[in-house]
């Protein structure tokens, strides 16, 4: 058996509309290609010249094997330093089943060939964290220099396995939404598809929720010569940082992101100072959010059958949590375009009970939503009790 996972034969090909990156992966199961395909309103004029994308994408799979990760193409010096040191320590602390491995690669000299204006990117999936990221720098009213300029969407596992037809259809629809919203806001839009998810099968420790930050970062760094700052929308606030919450990598995002910064692209955990309630309150007055908010985890075809195209199923745990929060904020009526509000009020007690139950089982985000409804005196009759949730102060309904 090979003692190293080897990344080699790097190639980048471009035509008028598409940029393809690929490399060969040896020593990790069958010999296969890892590939990414970019479609961009800018034409992606400055392709990455590093192997940052491949080494970030393959770090966790390689740490599962315990083998050396060898890369025959250069990596940014800052990233290579952290790959060999603190990044692995943080990941092993998060998931003790991972092994410390050697990283065999060369550091590239600084790339000084691209001068550019400040460009700030963020992912856009029309979820609560997406809308929050879009406005994160506006809220401080510091300077227009920090406005988001580019929206991204990545197919690295969030839509299911890359090879399935339903996954491709879901991604195509989501990418179209990102593109049209960017057009409306006057922003650039970029989508990336990849077979990276094929390298994350076979172990529950590699499930998307435990690995998403590194997967998405591997796609984002392809734009390191265009984008200066990438706002990574984390579901968890600073108060929810938990270095050992093995079930969800997002709990360590605010630390992890500083360690995958490259020489040219800085990752920031956007909105980590706000919890889910504050983020929901901020978007609740946003007309775009009222017609586009998409939090649902039910597959798109099933959603269409239940409530019609483009709407949230209004029946899954994530819909329930969001509807309870909007109800508590007094803003649910404004979201009729995307939620089945009538059904919610018909079943309010049962829905609240489910959110409360998830909170009691340990979900701090559900607990906060249930607590807010209790505080506002809108929850169904007792025996429900308010439980502590991460020491958060509750925002006003008018925020
Ligand atoms: Zn749903």
Image (cartoon, rainbow, N blue to C red):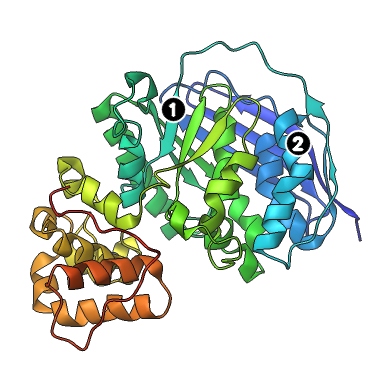
In the rendered image of this protein, does residue 31 appear above or below residue 364?
Answer: above
Residue nearest the viewer, comparing 370 with 177? 370
Where in the figure is residue 185, as x and y percent of width and height?
26, 28
Q: Residue at x 16, y 64 (%)?
A: 328
**Label 1 SS:** strand
**Label 2 SS:** helix
- Disc 2 CB within 8 Å of nearest ligand 1 atom: no
Q: Quadrant of residue 365?
A: bottom left
Is 96 left, or right, of 160 in this rendering?
A: right
Where in the figure is residue 16, as x and y percent of width and height?
49, 21
Is 314 left, or right, of 169 in this rendering?
A: left
Where in the figure is residue 20, as x and y percent of width and height?
60, 32
Q: Residue at x 21, y 77 (%)?
A: 351
Q: Earlier in the sequence, mark 2 or mark 1?
A: 2
Q: Residue at x 71, y 46 (%)?
A: 33
Where in the figure is residue 220, as x and y percent of width and height?
54, 36
Q: Quadrant of residue 146?
A: top left
Q: Residue at x 51, y 57 (%)?
A: 241
Please rate how many residues cluster around mark 1, counting C-alpha atoms within 10 Å: few if below 14, some from 14 to 19, many from 20. Answer: many
- Disc 1 CB within 8 Å of nearest ligand 1 atom: no
Residue nearest the viewer, comparing 294 with 254? 254
Q: Which mark is residue 316?
A: none
Report, in whole angstroms, how far the alpha carbon at label 2 lies from the one at label 1.
Answer: 23 Å
Which residue is disc 2 drawn over?
Answer: 80
Is 199 left, or right, of 146 in this rendering?
A: right
Q: Quadrant of ligand 1?
A: bottom left
Dot 2 and dot 1 residues touching (CB under 8 Å): no
Q: Which mark is residue 120?
A: 1
């Amino acid at each position: 058996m090979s003692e190293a996972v080897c990344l080699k034969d790097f190639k980048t090909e471009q035509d008028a509309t598409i940029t393809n990156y690929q490399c060969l992966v040896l020593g990790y199961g069958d010999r296969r290609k890892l590939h990414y395909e970019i479609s961009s309103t800018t034409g992606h004029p400055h392709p990455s010249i590093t192997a940052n994308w491949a080494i970030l994408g393959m770090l966790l799979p390689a740490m599962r094997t315990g083998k050396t990760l060898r890369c025959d193409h250069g990596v940014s010096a800052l990233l290579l330093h952290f790959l060999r040191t603190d990044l692995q320590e943080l990941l092993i602390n998060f998931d003790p089943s991972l092994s410390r491995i050697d990283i065999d690669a060369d550091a590239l000299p600084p790339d000084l060939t691209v001068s550019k204006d400040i460009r700030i990117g963020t992912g856009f999936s029309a979820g609560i964290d997406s809308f929050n990221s879009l406005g994160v720098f506006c809220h401080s009213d510091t300077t227009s220099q920090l406005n988001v300029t580019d929206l991204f969407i990545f197919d690295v596992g969030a839509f299911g396995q890359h090879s399935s037809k339903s996954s491709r259809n879901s991604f195509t629809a989501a990418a179209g939404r990102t593109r049209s919203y960017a057009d409306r806001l006057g922003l650039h839009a970029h989508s990336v598809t990849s077979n990276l998810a094929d390298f994350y099968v076979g172990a529950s420790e590699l499930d998307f929720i435990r690995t998403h930050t590194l997967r998405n970062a591997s796609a984002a760094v392809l734009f390191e010569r265009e984008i200066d700052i990438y706002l990574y929308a984390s579901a968890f606030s600073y108060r929810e940082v938990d270095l050992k919450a093995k079930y969800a990598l997002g709990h360590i995002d605010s630390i992890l992101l500083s360690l995958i910064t490259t020489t040219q692209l800085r990752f920031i955990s956007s909105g980590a100072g706000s919890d889910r309630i504050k983020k929901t309150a901020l978007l609740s007055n946003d007309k775009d959010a009222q017609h586009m908010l998409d939090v649902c985890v039910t597959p798109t075809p099933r959603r269409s059958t239940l409530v019609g195209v483009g709407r949230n199923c209004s029946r899954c745990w994530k819909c329930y949590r969001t509807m309870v929060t909007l109800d508590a904020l007094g803003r649910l009526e404004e979201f009729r375009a995307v939620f089945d509000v009538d059904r919610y009020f018909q079943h309010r007690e049962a829905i609240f009970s489910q959110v409360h139950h998830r909170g009691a089982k340990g979900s701090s985000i559900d607990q906060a939503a249930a607590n807010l409804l209790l505080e506002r005196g809108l929850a169904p009759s007792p025996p429900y009790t308010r439980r502590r949730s991460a020491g958060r102060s509750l925002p006003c309904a008018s925020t």
